[in-house]
Amino acid sequence: MKILFITTKSPLPLNDGHSLRSFNLLNSVAQQHEVTLLSFVKFPVEYEYTRELEKLCLSVKQFIVPENGSRVRVALSACLNIAGKKPYVAIKYNQLEMREEIRRLLRDVKFDLVHLDMLPLGVYLDEINIPVIFNEHNVESALLKRRCESVASPIARWYFIEQQRRLEDFETDIVRRVSHVIACSEEDRVILQTMAPGQRISVVPNGVDTDFYQTHGEHTEDPNNLVFVGGMNWFPNRDAVTWFDQAILPELIKREPDIRLDVVGKTVDGMANKHAQQITMHGFVDDTRPYIEKSAIVIVPIRIGGGTRLKVLEAMSMAKALVSTSVGVEGIKVAHRKNVLIADTPEEFASAIVELQHNEELRTQLGNAARKLVCNTYRWDIIGNSLLEVYKDVKGKSA
């Protein structure tokens, strides 16, 4: 098949969950089909990986989003958007150069399918007259709705609520208009199905490279060392670390005063932790595996969710014991005390950590079971095959 694959950021480098999912799905498709990639560029470093993408794809063309390079432009666009009816992201990604290139390609090449990777790309549906696969990394309007609940400023809260309303209308329209929707989890699929009863929606979860993410015994595990992996530029991660710092850590320190937490991922200005002596912010690192390997316990105190978290699958692939909220492991077929410990209150979370600290046998048991689960279910080759089955089904129905 000839596939037109369109993304909101480059699939390379693999520096966040978005790019990990986009690249591994693209890679699976490109192994069997002829792919033309159109991609917006979020960061200048993405241009350095164009040649690698060209090895996979028939052709690659990249486009600038002006707001990505200027905070002033972002603020101005957000203010101007107040008077409009569409959500901000729909305006931000509605770029003339991209629109004209989609129009040209569909005129000159006989594509079988278009793969839209992320919601904002729905703005181009009016240019497309062939089957469209829409990949939802998250149910974006549901994610924003959860965030609205935590906004304190009345003005900011009004803005987010208004954006959420517009985003839900936009998302519902896109979900109804495409040929087939891909969800990351069963939970997301249920939400999307309420938006578009009767729409074909398949679950293609996130995956993990089980060969890359495995423990080699190079770092000694420290029972007092915890790790959280995730960039603070993503609000659910920032909320998770803040909740752990303010609600869970005080109880934990009473029982285990030597406890320490490594936070690995992009940092943001103005974020201060209450327990700075116990929490080390490492920022972005090229390789998270040494931090995961030396920690006895991986924590996932996520309260705002959607999709499935690659950080969870990576830790499971390294056979690590996890303590997570229910939201943190949504979309992953885990069971409490079989392959993770699930805790949803500060007291439960602290108790679960203390139990694992003092029970090496349980840590090993949970870690081995977690590794077995991801190897059998969440390898990227398995995930990629499920996406290819969707492609095959949509192509067959349009023939």
Image (spheres, rainbow, N blue to C red):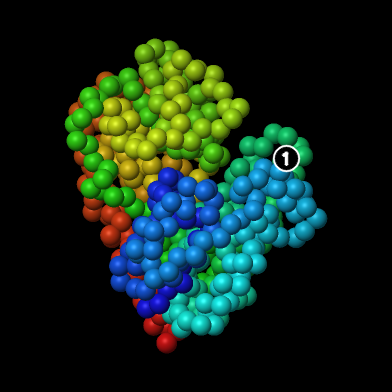
Residue at the outermost bottom position: 399
- Quick one: 199 or 208, which is closer to the camera? 208
How far across and down, in percent of the image, does residue 238 sit?
Answer: 53, 34
Q: Residue at x 45, y 76 (%)?
A: 113
Residue 36 sits above or below residue 273 on the image: below
Q: Residue at x 76, y 37 (%)?
A: 154
Q: Quadrant of the C terminus?
A: bottom left
Q: Residues within 10 Å of mark 1 (few under 14, many from 20)?
A: few
Q: Residue at x 21, y 39 (%)?
A: 368
Q: For numbered disc 1, what is the local secondary structure?
A: helix
How far across and down, in percent of the image, does residue 240 sit?
Answer: 50, 34
Residue 176 sits above or below residue 164 on the image: below
Rendering quarter of residue 218: top left
- Decide if residue 171 is on the left or right side of residue 312: right
Judge whether residue 340 can be spotted in this image.
no
- Quick one: 123 or 38, which is closer to the camera? 38
- Quick one: 248 or 40, which is closer to the camera? 40
Q: Quadrant of the N terminus?
A: bottom left
Q: Residue at x 43, y 15 (%)?
A: 253
How far across and down, in percent of the image, does residue 216 sit?
Answer: 19, 35
- Decide if residue 384 is on the left or right side of residue 99: left
How far across and down, in percent of the image, does residue 91 sit?
Answer: 68, 59
Residue 73 sits above or below residue 58 on the image: above
Identify the amino acid type marked 1. Answer: Ala
- Decide if residue 275 is on the left or right side of residue 350: right
- Quick one: 113 or 368, which is closer to the camera? 113
Rendering quarter of residue 389: bottom left
Q: Which residue is mark 1?
A: 156
